[in-house]
Image (cartoon, rainbow, N blue to C red):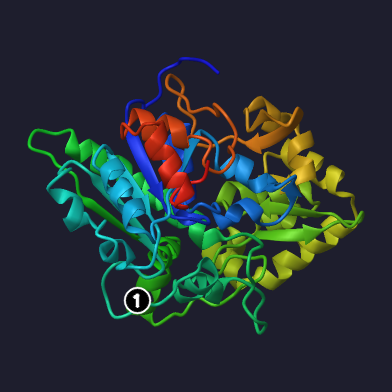
Amino acid sequence: MTDQARPLDGVRVIEMGQLLAGPFTATILAYFGAEVIKVEPPEGDPIRRWRIMRGDTSLWYYSLGRNKKSVTLDLKTPRGRELAAQLLATADVVVENFRPGLMESWGLGPADLKASNPDLVYARISGYGQSGPYAEKPGYASVTEGFGGFRYINGEPGKPPVRPNISMGDTLAAIHAALGIALALIQRSKPGGQGQVVDVALFESVFNLLEGVVPEYDGAGAVREPAGTTVTGIVPTNTYPCRDGKHVVVGGNGDSIFKRLMVAVGRPEMARDPALASNAGRVAEQASIEAVLQQWCLARDAAEVITVLEEARVPVGPIFSAADMLADPHYRARGLFESVEIDGQPLQIPAIVPRLDTTPGRTDWPGTAIGSHNDEILREVLGLDDAALEELAQAGVIKR
């Protein structure tokens, strides 16, 4: 760990939420220097026990919980809510991803905190946002990926939509929330600036991915449909099977790139064909172009395909698994893994981008045990003594 400055040094964030969208927002902020105090129920965030475990903690949590100070408060109790309000009065940012209205029912909504902390940036993450007819609906990432339009265009034509094997909607919402918080902090720093609410909906974060889908429908009545491994209206860009059973991705859709691609695969006449000189012409002849590329790739191992096309300066690459990433020299050179120690054993966790050259983020420590910072925060920030802490533990408000 170093003392190199980071952009969010001195910013205190209270994370009040669980599972993924809210916690990953706070992970990003903590990585870039914020002091993140994670408020958990006495039994801890459920994600601590999700998926593959090492001991009593998921391997995922060591990454998601990095750089955070864990405090347990039972927000279902008046005393727990009272302590949370005191903690929020000291904060620059709060991140919450409960269902809309729950924080208000606890007396911890934005209006409740405005008088005591007018500079507070209050980030709210939910499935459908804080307003509108669907605001009260439960909104997990899986559901909002469908409602937000992504699932409709993702998959093979004529088959059920495909889910990526990650909670993409949650992660997208977290990135949008971190951006919104950064913007709100910049605005707050201006003369006369104050805190404000950052309202992030999972479905809107997914909707933000859709590029030209809306104007193409509104302006031309065209509904973007699933296109498998291709992209509608852009040719050629696809995934091709190779002789050794591996797949490669080829992006040959630039006009000059297409010419180099066709020469590289032994079809110089297609490179010279004026009908294929522009993307519109190639779209009209997509089937014949794809047939040529598929046949060429199937006759070669993936490594040979990549070597030949890279020499021709055509964008091409493999399909990587986690094992491939960890073994790849470019991933290593870019510093995309950070090593932490868990019970004396090393564990690689992903670095967090973007990369800043003078004030980069870093991992200071992996996710810690439930309530491991209770004494530090409740003593130093809220001024509680041993007797008060013991009383809270006996009442089940905190875990010690």
Is residue 337 left or right of 292 when viewed as pictured? left
| The image quarter in which residue 102 lies | bottom left
* Above-or-below relation of 374 to 270: above
Q: Residue furthest top?
A: 3
Observer-nearest of 55 and 306: 55
Residue occupying the point 41% across, 32% down: 386
Q: Where's residue 31, x and y in %?
A: 48, 33
Observer-nearest of 204 and 27: 27
Disc 1 residue type?
Glu
Is residue 165 left or right of 6 when viewed as pictured? right
Is residue 250 left or right of 373 when viewed as pictured? right
Residue occupying the point 75% across, 37% down: 326
Is residue 226 left or right of 126 when viewed as pictured? right
**Residue 159 in sight here:** yes
- Count of marks overlaid on the render: 1
| The image quarter in which residue 269 lies | bottom right
| The image quarter in which residue 309 lies | top right
Residue that label 1 marks: 136
Q: Residue furthest left?
A: 192
Q: Where's residue 170, x and y in %?
A: 50, 59
Observer-nearest of 114 and 360: 114
Residue occupying the point 73% across, 49% down: 53
Q: Residues within 10 Å of mark 1 (few under 14, many from 20)?
A: some
* Above-or-below relation of 70 to 230: above
Q: Where's residue 76, x and y in %?
A: 39, 61
Residue occupying the point 23% across, 41% down: 89
Q: Secondary structure at mark 1?
A: loop
**Residue 29 in sight here:** no
Q: Which image quadrant: the N terminus?
A: top right
* Above-or-below relation of 378 to 146: above
Q: Where's residue 267, x and y in %?
A: 77, 55
